[in-house]
Amino acid sequence: MNQPRALLSVYDKKGLEQLAKALAESGYELVSSGGTAKFIQESGLRITPVESITGNPEAFDGRMKTLSFQVESSILFDRSNPKHQEEAKALHLIPIDVVVCNFYPFHKALEEKLPLEQAIELIDIGGPAMVRAAAKNFHHVLVLVDPDDYPAVCKHLQTGQPIPIETRLELAAKAFKLTADYDSAIDTYFQEQMKKPILRLRFENATPLRYGENPQQKGVALWSENPDPLSLARFRKVSGKELSFNNFLDGDAAINVLASLDADQPACVIVKHTNPCGVGMGETLEEAFEKAWQGDPVAAFGGIVALNRPISSSLIQKFLQEKKFVEIFLAPGIEESAQDALAKNKKNLILLVNPTLATASMPTETDIKKIRGGILMQEPDRHLLLRSELEVVSEKKPSESQWRDLLFAWRIAKESKSNSIVIANHEQLVGAGVGQQDRVRACKLAVEKAGGRAKKASAASDGFFPFADGPEVLISAGVEAIIHPGGSIRDGETIALCNKHGVALVSTKGIRGFKH
């Protein structure tokens, strides 16, 4: 009976010494070449040069090492097939039972935008061939492509027990993922060289949903390999029922609104159907929550609440006393007594915790929207307006408190569905008109929601006012400061209207806040 063989050929040598020793102690003959062979020999272990199997020397600056009929056949033949066994014997092949391999770091070519001549030398040929062969034959060949898997395999080797088929399958799946990602990176690089944008997506770790957008629809949430720190995949569910499709959409929207606000101050965001209906900032979290809730109590009922400070017992006590109802709380943390009170009195309320929410930042991932037969792709809108970027185009200048409210209102408007008008007063959302086909109707809706609170308030528009009728609605309700992108051919009429009524008008100088 032949001594079992392990073929080791790696670029990343993390953990290799321990694995090689464990294999050798378990009776494996170690086969290797090039830098991997030298590394193993320096560890005091014997190796069989891969050239003794291939019958050929390493050639062409290492381009040819392991790629050969003898190596691939020794990995690939089916040990359970008598015909394969006979052929292998006739060909004098000794089985390779373990393949340990990872590839040249082609991702550097993408990250560092290396020139084509350098990138080509990072394309591994023999490694992917061996890995694919071993993964295909996983019933008989163990394939290892991730150093993080070495310790578990070493423990198996120490026991002397066969490695379970479930583990072999899992390692084979990881191997095929590596080759798929590797080829995808090469494809992406070559397409970029030809100025042809390409996007390959892979999402995993499916989270079952309570239901889809409607109860008659099934759904799952899938996650990228390394999700954003504020992805809902990164939140810990402390209590409550399973999340639905809409819960994920609303939760994500609430996180994005919170990320656009000043993290130095306690803030609360309440979202309903992906739009902020309540936003408040205050000296305390309790004050911020109350301001957000009172912004629109009707819409807030059953909404999604995101906070940038840990939930206190006093907040939950008041929440329960006033019989408020929300579906989800998202927070950096929660006091133990507050958690106990929610578990006792609101068993279905979903509580999600992520410490990163205390310092929430804008998303960095590419923004993608699905359309029939394709996708639309754009960079994320991370632009947070600064006062220094703005231009006062009216005779009246905003006061300091109005400046704060204008920026506050703008940041809410840009996270609301277009067309959007937001009215704010003392860092509280008091009225919003969102998702309207015409801007004047959005103004009327925002004013209707604000009621008397529109007096001496500030307003933001995510796009320019095409006519002066929208500003006229706001000014008639008592709004005293307005911010919009400007750029309409009738800007002069809007400026004249504001000057007539002593209203401050600020232009973002064309920066728009559309969200569809």
Image: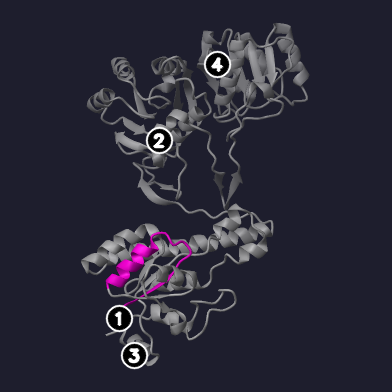
Closer mark to the observer between disc 4 and disc 2: 4
> In the drawing, what numbered circle is on residue 232?
none
Q: Earlier in the sequence, mark 4 or mark 1?
A: 1
Which residue is disc 2 drawn over? 247
| Percent position of residue 239, x then y | 28, 33
Say which amino acid is labelled 2.
Asn
Q: Earlier in the sequence, mark 2 or mark 1?
A: 1
Q: Earlier in the sequence, mark 4 or mark 2?
A: 2
Instruction: Say above or below: 384 vs 102.
Output: above
Residue 245 visible in the shown view? no
User: Mark 1 and mark 4 in contact (Cβ < 8 Å)?
Assistant: no
| Percent position of residue 241, x then y | 30, 36
Dot 1, crowdedness within 10 Å: few (<14), some or many (≥20)?
A: few
Residue at x-position 50% and y-position 28%: 257
| Percent position of residue 442, x then y | 59, 22
Specify start and end residues of the magenta stretch as a single range: 4-26
Which residue is disc 3 drawn over? 86
Q: Nearer the viewer, residue 467 or 76?
A: 76
